[in-house]
């Protein structure tokens, strides 16, 4: 076994010599993961990526094919790519990056030649749905931060396709915190097709030498009377709105101390009333929306700062003034007690007690204890910005927030984020004030203190925040708790869930086994990676009976900072930024795409518009045997099923919005469809066509009649996305197999004729629509004559009643005022 000084390295034909430090726990995990679909659970900063790398190297050497590593964000993808290019002894060009910044046609070409693809899941999902790539030759897929594999996240679809399509699949899932309990962990395993769980904790002897104790301290902060008065004023309004909901029979709650579960229950009750077309449901839903705004304001003043509350109030005032403002927003800012809370917040000029406590903690760490770096975590971007300004008066502090923009709050681009991290790592400043963007997988340097400005009520986030300290030396975590607020509840919820997670991890790991037996098992697994050849030491002799064909790795080499850490970076997805991960992977559309070929004679092809990826329909179809899906940026329609059939899909809600709002785009879209396809189809998806909105049934029937008679479209109903997918498959199969028709995506949207432009102008007046517009033009001959017609003359036109005539005259004849 080759060594350099006291340092040992992993040796493998596909690894750069003397690069990967030999760590027994990583070799043990890799030894297990190379033979089974495995969930690797390892504390943050201890090299989960290295485990995946070892498995990838062995699979490429032993089986060949292609390796795919998926990570949630573009910066994290790039970090993994940099690490793999440094560590793997293969040409850099064989390791490619797939993000939304790489054009689809380029990705298709790169996929064919690459040995390792490192990508965001949204892009791979799109490419699979669009049949741009296939997974048949992929021999190893790694799902980084695999705890995300719940709900409709792209990991689930990719895993399903991988196990379905690959000839020799192997999955490795990686996470420091896979779930809060056994059920959540098992859900992740089921979604990814994992049947083996390998867990390492700081308690393991092999891991312990690479970690240090982390002291967790929590400090109570007493809120001053002025702050409590603001909170109490807001809570009084909450209780008033609850009283109204109680009158409606929605809740028995009268106290402002509500849980999110209480809110969800009330919302479900109100939705039931709305589904039954009861007006009380709409009234109650508006009151509940106001309660949510009030609760947010209470959270700001209780757990954040008065400055953050002032910023929130300002956004609400601006929202209430905007066009289309909700009644809840308008009532919120006009409520006398809320206005009094706003006045008190503007008047308050003292230092929030959390600010002073945070300053004191940081001063102790950096000054008295000679620390070098501190991270402050906060839930609110408002607080992050205000706290950075405050701490900047005493320390060299920088903010670190997500990419999404908010009114009055600029986000950070990925380039700006990376620059801040590089400067923090280089010691250019000492305090990083971050929102949740820095929690999951962030490649930040070791810090001396992690300060929670407020506790978080989830075990996963708490564990990941704490993982920023205690890697190289003893670390400290401090949590600020505002007394008698939800801070305390969140702290204990997180503590309980964290304890439960650790217990579940122990159960899954089977720590009840004797330590010696575990070490014996570890040695047998390590034999898969440690070779007895080439100057083996005495400790290698104990593994001399390992089967020679499995002796893939030898230990050799020296340490490298990159291999000690995961190198994981995560974008903000938590409350401060609202979820935004998929949006960043949207591809630049190509207009006017034309394609005509079917993949083969026995495959039914369905072309879907890129924007339809918001639903599950295209993904569902792509998993069905005999169906080939293709993604295009369609100029006409949502789905193309043959050279004559195009489908416009509308939810019932969207369809009714076209009748009650000013958006007439559906009728325009159908007009374009009829000019390009002989058999346009409209699918109305969902229930409650005559119940969901307060729209007269005859208005709905009239719109359906217009679609069929004026536009020649077939109108079909489905119950939901699954039903829609089934219907699309049936129509496409009938067209392509029974009638032997090919798929043809027609090109650019045709320019409107003069008559169509005239109809468009008139139909936009008072939202009168295309049918009435035609009647008006037939009567008055010109757009100008319609505009100047008297109300009495307008009433002579078929389809124009008093309300419509008055509205036309009001729109045409009123002075313009903003």
Image (cartoon, grey):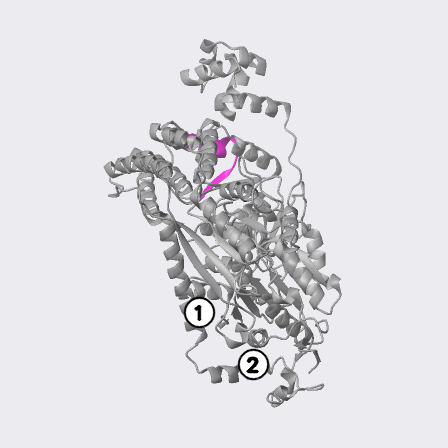
- The residue carrying mark 2 is 525
Q: Would you say 262 lies left or right of 626 here? A: left
Residue in view at x 70 percent, y 68 percent: 88
The x and y percentages for residue 423 are 65, 51
- The residue carrying mark 1 is 505
The mark that comes first in sequence, 2 or 1, is 1
Secondary structure state at the residue bearing disc 1: helix
Task: Specify the segment rendered in magenta.
Answer: 699-717
Magenta span: predominant SS is: helix
Q: Give above or below for 108 relative to 541.
A: above
The x and y percentages for residue 314 are 47, 32
Which sits in the foreground, 285 or 774? 285
Residue in view at x 58 percent, y 45 percent: 403
Q: Is residue 707 found inside the magenta-colored segment of the image?
A: yes
Which sits in the foreground, 649 or 616? 616
Which sits in the foreground, 299 or 223? 223
Which sits in the foreground, 278 or 326? 326
The numbered dot on residue 109 is: none
């Amino acid at each position: 076994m080759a060594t350099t000084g006291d340092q040992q390295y992993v040796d493998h034909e596909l690894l750069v010599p003397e690069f990967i430090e030999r760590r027994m726990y990583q070799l043990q995990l890799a030894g297990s993961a190379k033979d089974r679909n495995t969930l690797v659970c390892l504390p943050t900063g201890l090299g989960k990526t290295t485990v995946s790398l070892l498995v990838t190297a062995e699979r490429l050497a032993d089986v060949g094919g292609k390796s795919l590593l998926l990570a949630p964000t573009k910066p994290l993808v790039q970090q993994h790519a940099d690490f793999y290019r440094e560590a793997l002894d293969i040409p850099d060009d064989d390791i490619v990056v797939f993000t939304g910044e790489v054009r689809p046609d380029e990705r298709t070409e790169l996929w064919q030649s690459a040995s390792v693809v490192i990508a965001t899941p949204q892009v791979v999902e799109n490419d699979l749905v669009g049949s741009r790539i296939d997974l048949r030759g992929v021999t190893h897929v790694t799902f980084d931060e695999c705890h995300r594999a719940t709900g409709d996240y792209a990991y689930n679809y990719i895993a399903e396709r991988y196990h379905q399509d690959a000839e020799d699949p192997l999955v490795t899932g990686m996470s420091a915190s896979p779930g809060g309990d056994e059920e959540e962990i098992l859900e992740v395993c089921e979604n990814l097709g994992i049947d083996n769980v390998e867990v390492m904790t700081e308690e393991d002897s092999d891991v312990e030498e690479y970690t240090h104790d982390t002291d967790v301290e929590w400090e109570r902060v007493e809120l001053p009377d002025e702050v409590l008065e603001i909170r109490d004023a807001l809570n009084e309004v909450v209780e008033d709105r609850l009283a109204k909901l109680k009158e409606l029979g929605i809740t028995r709650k009268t106290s402002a101390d509500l849980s999110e579960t209480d809110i969800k229950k009330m919302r479900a009750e109100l939705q039931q009333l709305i589904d039954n077309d009861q007006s009380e449901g709409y009234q109650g839903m508006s009151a509940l929306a106001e309660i949510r705004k009030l609760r947010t304001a209470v959270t700001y003043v209780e757990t954040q700062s008065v400055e953050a509350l002032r910023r929130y109030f300002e956004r609400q005032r601006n929202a209430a003034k905007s066009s289309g403002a909700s009644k809840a927003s308008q009532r919120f800012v006009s409520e006398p007690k809320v206005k009094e809370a706003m006045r008190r917040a503007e008047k308050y000029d003292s230092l929030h007690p959390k600010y002073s406590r945070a300053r004191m903690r940081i001063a102790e760490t950096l000054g008295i204890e000679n620390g070098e770096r501190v991270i402050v975590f906060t839930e609110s971007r408002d607080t992050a910005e205000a706290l950075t300004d405050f701490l900047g008066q005493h320390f060299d502090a920088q903010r670190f927030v997500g990419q999404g923009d908010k009114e009055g709050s600029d986000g950070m681009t990925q380039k700006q984020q990376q620059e801040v991290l590089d400067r923090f790592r280089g010691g250019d400043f000492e305090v990083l004030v971050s929102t949740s963007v820095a929690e999951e997988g962030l490649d930040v340097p070791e810090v001396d203190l992690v300060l929670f400005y407020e506790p978080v009520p989830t075990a996963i986030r708490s564990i990941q925040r704490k993982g920023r300290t205690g890697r190289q030396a003893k670390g400290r975590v401090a949590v600020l708790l505002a007394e008698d607020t939800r801070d305390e509840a969140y702290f204990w919820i997180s503590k309980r869930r964290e304890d439960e997670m650790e217990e579940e991890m122990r159960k899954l790991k089977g720590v009840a086994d004797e330590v010696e037996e575990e070490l014996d098992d570890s040695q047998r697994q390590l034999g898969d990676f440690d070779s007895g050849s080439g100057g083996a030491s005495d400790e290698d002799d104990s593994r001399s009976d390992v089967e020679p064909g499995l002796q893939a790795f030898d230990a050799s080499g020296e340490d490298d900072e990159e291999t000690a850490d995961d190198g994981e970076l995560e974008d903000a997805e938590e409350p401060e930024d609202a979820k935004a991960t998929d949006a960043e992977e949207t591809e630049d559309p190509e207009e006017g795409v034309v394609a005509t070929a079917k993949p083969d004679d026995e495959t039914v092809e369905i072309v879907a518009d890129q924007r339809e990826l918001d639903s599950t329909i295209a993904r569902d179809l792509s998993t069905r045997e005999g169906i080939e899906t293709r993604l295009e940026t369609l100029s006409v329609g949502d789905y193309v099923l043959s050279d004559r059939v195009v489908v416009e899909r509308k939810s019932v809600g969207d369809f009714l919005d076209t009748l009650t709002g000013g958006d007439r785009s559906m009728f325009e879209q159908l007009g374009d469809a009829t000019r390009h396809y002989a058999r346009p189809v409209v699918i109305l998806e969902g229930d409650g066509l005559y119940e969901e909105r307060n729209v007269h049934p005859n208005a709905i029937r009239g719109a359906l009649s217009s679609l069929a008679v004026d536009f020649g479209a077939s109108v079909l109903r489905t119950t939901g996305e699954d039903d829609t997918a089934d219907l699309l498959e049936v129509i496409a199969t009938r067209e392509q197999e029974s009638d032997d028709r090919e798929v043809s995506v027609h090109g650019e949207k045709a320019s409107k004729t003069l008559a169509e432009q005239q109809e468009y102008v008139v139909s936009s007046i008072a939202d009168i629509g295309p049918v009435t517009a035609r009647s008006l033009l037939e009567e008055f001959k010109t757009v100008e004559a319609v505009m100047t017609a008297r109300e009495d003359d307008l009433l002579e036109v078929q389809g124009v009643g008093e309300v419509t005539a008055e509205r036309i005259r009001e729109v045409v004849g009123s002075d313009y005022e903003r």
